Image (cartoon, helix red, strand yellow):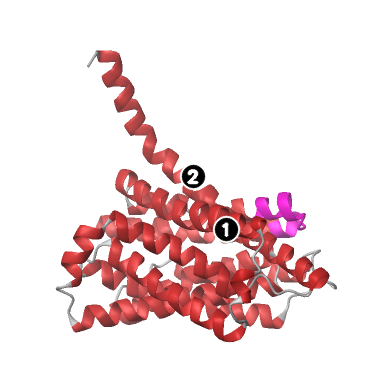
């Protein structure tokens, strides 16, 4: 291999981490916008044809099935060996992670997005950061950073600014939907508890094929059963071609599986601290995507709210990084 080829390969390896991180931010930030677009398309078909073609059941059935099968196949050897050695505690952890992280949290995310705009939902879900920190302090005994009250204060001010400015043009009156906010708060709590169980699973050294793949497959079965019970087989048989391509290709493969793959590559190249730091930009991408694709309002109040929340998250990340370095 020539010197130029070696340099080119080294250069590619140096760039693979930042490129993976940038792609993760783009994919994860586009998640809610694509899902909202699919909801709006499904609602228009329901009004025109009287057919309920979209619900959280078939959306997450496809996405969890694709990501679950993909990760189990990629990690099948390690997962099979480790599955035989699972302890009762590890099985309980996987069960809790399935219920909270792969079922309840996505359902709440979806139902909140039905009643809220993408901008509104994105800002409310920023409460997951302080909620996760509080849970880690309560359950794992981790000390909260000294800047935690400041971070929470900035997030709350950002949410109040956004709420006072009104909501989305998609909804009549532009105000916040109480049911949407309630589901969003359920999602915040579920995601926070899911993050806690994920950290415990990581401490046990369980491979991704079990911690993500197996949990996704079990959740997909639950979504399929609920869909059949509530809507019957027609809920899947009535899916039109655009819907199948939209969910399987766009949401399941590109957003769900793609973000997991790019996140894993970014973690491997750059480390958890760096990735977590820059991942806050997903909020900015989400707001811009909602404005560009769905024409949701993005004025100075939403921009100020997003800036305050990003600053709050960054302050907490920097404080946590200094605390780790000092320890």
The answer to if 289 sits in the magenta stretch is yes
Residue 235: % across, % down: 62, 74
Residue 253 as seen in the image, left or right of residue 122: left
| Magenta highlight range | 287-302
- Label 2 belongs to which residue? 23
For disc 1, the neighbor class at 10 Å (few under 14, some 14 to 19, many from 20) is many
- Is 54 above or below relative to 291? below
Instruction: Quadrant for the N terminus, please.
Output: top left
Residue 237 as seen in the image, left or right of residue 75: right
Residue occupying image coordinates x 38% and y 67%: 145
What secondary structure characterizes most of the magenta part?
helix
How much space separates mark 2 and mark 1, taking CA atoms?
12 Å
For disc 2, the neighbor class at 10 Å (few under 14, some 14 to 19, many from 20) is some
Q: Does residue 125 show up?
A: yes
Residue located farthest toward the right when viewing the structure as drawn? 173
Q: Nearer the viewer, residue 171 or 52?
A: 52
Residue 238: % across, % down: 66, 69
- Label 1 belongs to which residue? 31
Residue 222 as seen in the image, left or right of residue 197: right
Residue occupying image coordinates x 33% and y 75%: 197
């Amino acid at each position: 291999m020539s010197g130029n080829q070696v340099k080119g390969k080294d250069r590619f390896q140096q760039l693979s981490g930042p490129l993976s991180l940038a792609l993760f931010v783009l994919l994860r930030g586009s998640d809610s916008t694509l899902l909202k677009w699919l909801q709006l398309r499904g609602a228009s078909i329901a009004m025109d044809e009287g057919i309920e073609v979209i619900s959280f059941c078939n959306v997450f059935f496809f996405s969890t099935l694709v990501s679950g099968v993909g990760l189990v196949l990629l990690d099948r050897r390690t997962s099979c060996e480790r599955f035989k050695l699972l302890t009762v505690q590890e099985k309980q952890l996987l069960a809790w992670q399935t219920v909270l992280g792969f079922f309840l949290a996505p359902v709440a995310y979806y139902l909140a997005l039905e009643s809220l705009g993408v901008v509104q939902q994105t800002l409310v879900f920023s409460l997951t950061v302080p909620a996760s920190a509080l849970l880690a302090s309560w359950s794992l005994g981790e000390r909260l950073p000294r800047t935690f009250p400041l971070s929470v204060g900035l997030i709350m001010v950002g949410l109040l600014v956004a709420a006072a400015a009104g909501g989305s043009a998609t909804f009549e009156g532009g105000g916040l939907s109480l049911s949407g906010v309630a589901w969003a708060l359920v999602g915040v709590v579920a995601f926070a508890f899911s993050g806690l169980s994920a950290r415990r699973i990581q401490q046990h050294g369980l491979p991704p094929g079990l911690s993500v793949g197996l949990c996704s497959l079990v959740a997909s079965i639950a979504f399929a059963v609920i869909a059949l019970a509530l809507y019957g087989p027609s809920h899947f048989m009535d899916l039109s071609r655009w819907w199948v391509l939209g969910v399987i290709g766009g949401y399941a493969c590109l957003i769900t599986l793609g973000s997991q793959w790019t996140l894993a590559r970014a973690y491997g190249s750059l480390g958890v601290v760096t990735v977590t730091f820059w991942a806050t930009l997903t909020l900015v991408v989400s707001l811009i995507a909602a404005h560009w694709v769905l024409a949701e309002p993005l004025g100075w109040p939403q921009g100020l709210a997003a800036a305050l929340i990003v600053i709050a998250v960054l302050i907490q990340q920097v404080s946590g990084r200094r605390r780790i370095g000092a320890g």
